Amino acid sequence: MNQTAKNKAGKPKQKQKGFISGSSAPEQKISMRVVEESGKPIQSTFNRTKTSPFGLFNHDAAERLQRSGPNEVAHDKAPHALVQLALSFKNPFVIVLLILATISYILDVHLAEPDERSWKGVIILVTMVTISSLLRFFQEYRSNKAAERLKSMVRTTATVLRRTNDAANPQRQEIPMRELVVGDIVSLQAGDMIPADIRLFASRDLFISQAVLTGEALPVEKYDTLGAVAQKSADANPAADSQADSQADLLDLSDICFMGTNVVSGTATAVVVATGANTYFGSLAKNVVSHKRIETSFDRGVSSVSWLLIRFMLVMVPIVFMINGVTKGDWMSALTFALAVAVGLTPEMLPMIVSANLAKGAMAMARRKVVVKRLNSVQNFGAMDVLCTDKTGTLTQDKIILERHLDISGNKDESILQLAWLNSFHQSGQKNLMDIAIVSHADERGAAAKLLRYSKIDEMPFDFVRRRLSVIVEEQGGAQLMVSKGAVEEMLAVCSHTQQGDAVQVLDAKARTALLEKAREYNEEGYRVLIVATREIDPAHAKTQYKTEDEAQLVVRGFLTFFDPPKDSAAPAIRALQEYGVAVKVLTGDNAIVTLKVCRDVGLDPGTPLTGQEIEAMSEQQLNEAVKYTTVFAKLTPLQKSRVVKALQANGHTVGFLGDGINDAPALRDADVGISVDSGADIAKETADIILLEKSLMVLEEGVVKGRETFGNILKYLNMTASSNFGNVFSVLVASAWLPWEPMLAVHLLIQNLIYDISQMMLPWDKMDEDFLKKPRKWDAGNIRRFMIWIGPTSSVFDITTYILMWTVFGAGAMYAADGGSAGQSIMNSGWFIEGLVSQTLVVHMLRTRKIPFIQSTAALPVLLSTGIAIAIGCYLPFSPLAESIGFVALDKSYFYWLVATMAGYMILAQTVKTIYIRRYGQWF
């Protein structure tokens, strides 16, 4: 019997950790309707749901949809716009700014004397918070809307029976899953997702994967009402008189299937008993799934960098406060200035920059017909350094051609095509590409290739353990015939004889070796090979229902050979990915010989393959070592594909998986970025993070490039802002210890930071150097820290020269010596404000590339404009009508000659330090 059938209702089994493990609250809240339906006469379910085996009328279904709403669970939707707006303020940097704004209000307004009260600091801080949060909200709201539009391009459907107003006969219809209603009659086959909570009333060898709910690897068998009663009787357990005695047994109900699970094999017809939020999966959405979403490497990277900068701020701000308090003696002023420094160290635009970059990347990929279901996967796509791909339908075309139908000696035999047609035509499950090729080839040959006199009795559907499919047919007035086809080794395991012409011989070791050798020869020619076998069933043992253990004592009749040509885009896509530092590995359920041939055809060096049988015998440590040197993994089960993906991740790789079949779902779920195609199985599309709407694999290269551009622009902001802020703080420390007053007032620091941050809004539209895109990139908080410490102080060198310049050449020192008043401070503040803002903004062009700026690499036009405007505003402020009110004075025009010389020196020093840094550490960002 099929091994997967051992895990049946009523038998104790050890639960693995899944979405529901360890949480009883959702189970207690689940509607008891599903439990009450199980095991009762099916007519009672039809009565309650007001339906029949013939399905709903279209108008009735429309009315029910209007009343109950779409068949969707809560977490599938983006939050309401007001909720998104509120969440835009939920960020550690924004919270820091709000705390600083509150403190500024207390110090500058609440505790200050009436004639000294100033709202400037509070207004600037609130403005910064508002701009940052509103821009983030705008980007994320637009991204969510765009994501919804993109997702609508990927249709996940259900097959239902519906009736028109004037017809009693039901018709099969493919409808969007969200339009399903209670009472709908749904048809299921291998590869389908269970679209709602349903009760079976007809099924054949139905195996359901419930891993999404339970975490259990093996699929479980489900039965219609009669089958469930019979199975329950056979597996009677004194401790379980009713399957519904305990909520813990809810998922063991044999005639109930739950939304979100998927059909591994078999067929069924069922009635929908619950949809949307009323399903078991829907009850989990708010309580478990939406609150325990797995944190991606992208999330962890953003968090680690954010807290690095916050810790740095918590260290530096008290130091600034103490030095200013001790040297100036005005502790209140020192506190105000320290708070302004804290603002200067806060990269409050980071959430907006991240959201804008991810949204821009997703929209750019959408123009290439790539649907990004989760925005974070854009960066993961760029960070990917290993792409695992299935072979069939991904590297090869999704159209297989039946080349030959041969007897056991390799001679063309029309009877083999006839038997193959019987098997493929009469199977009721999801026809794979080889079944389609067989039926199409027979259609081309005409009636002579079809044994129309046979009618179907039963079938044993394909599954990924047996790797074969059998149908039982009967000739009118004659004996029953079992016709099986499947993978060579799995078929030989259940065969006992061979037949050529009318001669039947025992399948001994010599004959078995000869058959295996012939199959190998076909494989080496690039053909996929199936064996066709039959068994005539004695009338005394004939029956209407068969089980997989009946697949025994079969007679090998011949071979089917299929040609599966590689996609035209496969070879250039693999070559391009390798040029961008992405290793390609093939994970397939097909045999190794055919896979090696396809790999060589697409320019992939296959090396020595590793088979599923070998993987099964390996420990996790052994597999982790083996995957380092293996390119081709053949004859894999779905769970073995997942094991390979996890082994690669354990070795520190960011792993993508490209697949479109039912057997790819576990690996798609476990990969860092799951990629599927629009023509893939429902479960594959639902599990994937990214879906390709066109068949060319070249979009993979473009996706990798866009992912790296997105990540690179995020890193630019982080590195440039962190280093500039550190340089400013270092300069403040020097000035605090030397100058008799602050080099800039707190309000000046706030204005400078506001102008600089606004100038950075265009960074998501910047270009990345080609050499940056050639290698996968990951978050590296250590490099950001090192970058900040190396590059930051370079600006301080010229900040100090500016202090000296303003103190000596422009008379700030002389004015202080004369009267100790504020005139000298205003000159110092104005001069350093301009130099600090210009250098901080200009250095964007120095640090955005490892090349020589403006000569070897120039920023995109939006960045040139935004930084140019920021510099112009900064230079104008001390000469503007607002100058006096914020403590600035107009400087002598000769100042700008000195400014140009200072900036020239700064750019030369920054380029020199950058070159040394790159030579020492081998990287820039």
Image (spheres, rainbow, N blue to C red):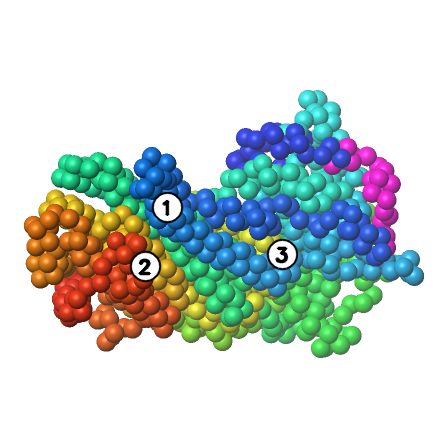
Magenta range is 34-57
The amino acid at mark 1 is Trp
**365 vs 885, nearest the viewer:** 885
Question: Which one is closest to the eye, mark 2 or mark 3?
Answer: 2
The amino acid at mark 2 is Leu
The residue at 68%/74% (across/down) is: 441
**What is the CA distance from the residue labelled 1 to the residue labelled 3?**
58 Å
**Drawn side of residue 301 relative to residue 853, left or right:** right
The amino acid at mark 3 is Asp
**Drawn side of residue 243 relative to residue 887, left or right:** right
**Drawn side of residue 811 relative to residue 48, left or right:** left
Q: Per the image, is 45 magenta?
A: yes
**295 vs 302, nearest the viewer:** 302
Residue 322 screen position, x and y as percent: 19, 37
The quadrant of the image that shows the C terminus is bottom left
Q: Secondary structure at mark 2?
A: loop
Q: Secondary structure at mark 3?
A: helix
**What is the CA distance from the residue labelled 2 to the residue labelled 3?**
62 Å
Residue 206 screen position, x and y as percent: 69, 47
Q: Which residue is mark 2?
A: 882
> Does residue 393 sit above or below 214 in this rendering?
below
**845 vs 43, nearest the viewer:** 845
Residue 75 screen position, x and y as percent: 59, 46
Q: Per the image, is 783 magenta?
A: no
The quadrant of the image that shows the N terminus is top right
Picture quadrant of residue 387? bottom left
Q: Which residue is mark 1?
A: 119
The residue at 54%/30% (across/down) is: 22
Compare marks 1 and 2 and give the one earlier in the sequence.
Answer: 1
Q: Secondary structure at mark 1?
A: loop
**Drawn side of residue 298 relative to residue 547, left or right:** left
- Taking the view exactly as shown, the residue that stands out farthest to the top is 239
